[in-house]
Amino acid sequence: MPELSSKSHKVAVVGCGLIGGSIALSLSKVGHSVYVTDVPGNEKRIKKQIPGAQFRKTLADVCSESPEIIFISVPSSEVNRVIGELAPRVRSGTILTDVAGIKQPVMEGAARSVPEGVIFVGGHPMAGSEKSGVEAAQPFLFQNAVYVLTPLKNYTAESVRLLIEMVEQLGSRILMMDASQHDRIAAATSHLPQLLAVELVNLLGELSSTDENFNTLAAGGFRDMTRIASSEYTVWNEVIKANRGNIHAVLDKYIQRLSELSGNLRSGEDSEIADAFGKARRARAGIRKGGKGFLHPLYDLYVVVEDRVGVLKEITSTLADVSINIKDIELLKVREGSGGMFRLSFDTEEIQDRASGILEQHGFQILRKEYEG
């Protein structure tokens, strides 16, 4: 984390779920005066999780504190409404920013609502968790994550300096990007893979309805590559609606590629298929390893275990005792009387390293699968 400014600033956070709560918690811990507001009924939960923040009941109450920067962390469908309520009430020079995963609709709304003198910069922190709500907030959620910023106008460096400083104090790395470019990339690298995983698993479900062996043999690689198919539609509903045009465009291109592949298979054009494999291998080598993009990687360990009662509980409790969260767990192999193997998945490589060392200290044999990005 960069060296922190000694000056305390007034920061407001509207919406205290996982993202907003983590912003408030992190910035309050480094000494800023943080004011938060949320839907009625959440005050006690917020005060318990973020004791350093000061709760305000309404947006008007928040604005009366004259915050220098306001993070808007409400559901995507509510962002433009909140911008419209805040923008006329804040002082000239105030920075408004959001955290929505689709930027173009937000920027269009801000262009209509934000008056001259108020600064709006769209934001999208590439961080998350399988948990939600303010109880899941953590001060290091954004550590080493890319934080995309999409300025509404060509602001001076000095006018957005405070936002840059705040994002850096969260531990993130800033990437400036046009909103439309952000949404096209999101469609290709996040939204399309999600839909493909859903339909691939649905195809398997259809095939397995007449032959259960499809499910039996789909363990391992197939299950790993379709993990995201377990996502709830409620999480994706607003995203798909907001980015429908970009998703449709990239889906059409993918369908064209599948059509070409189908033709090559039908005609026996093995050289074309080989060429596709080669291009994919070279393209994948250019993808940055170990970063946090739209799809968060998981880092796996394989734990060899004896066939005895309580071994899984021993593994999970050993890690829980040191506050290590297992993102996914799967029994891969088991042989009665001799033992088996569990695959444990973690959110970061650092957590993977720590879990490996702790389990080895407790006598477990660890086989490590390096994440290849």
Image (tube, helix red, strand yellow):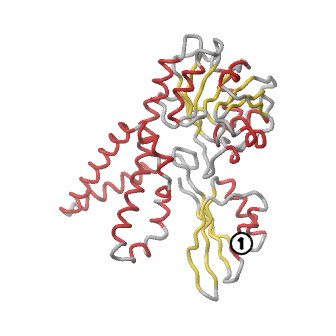
Hey, which quadrant is residue 61 in on the image? top right
Most extreme residue toward the left is 267
Question: What residue lies at 67% left-to-right and 36% top-to-bottom?
Answer: 40
Within 10 Å of disc 1 (Cα), the crowding (few <14, some 14-19, many 20+) is few
Q: Residue at x 59, y 60 (%)?
A: 370
Q: Residue at the spot x=68%, y=22% of the render? A: 162
Is residue 258 or residue 63 the one in the foreground? 63
Image location of residue 318, percent across then percent down:
76, 66
Quadrant for the N terminus in the image: top right
Identified by mark 1, the residue type is Lys
Q: Is residue 350 left or right of residue 123?
A: right
**Front-most of 210 and 285?**
210
Residue at x 59% of width, y 37% of height: 125
Q: Secondary structure at mark 1?
A: helix
In percent of width and height, residue 337 lies at 64, 89
Most extreme residue toward the front is 41
For residue 338, what is the image quadrant?
bottom right
**320 or 371: nearer the eye?**
320
For residue 167, side relative to residue 260 (left or right): right
Would you identify the image quadrant in which residue 364 lies?
bottom right
Residue 325 position within the rendered picture, expressed as x and y whole percent measured from the top left: 69, 58
Q: Position of residue 165 (x, y in %)?
A: 69, 27
Q: Is residue 364 above or below residue 95?
A: below
Task: Report the side of 89 relative to 221 (left or right).
Answer: right
Total marks in image: 1
In the rendered image, which residue does mark 1 sit on? 313
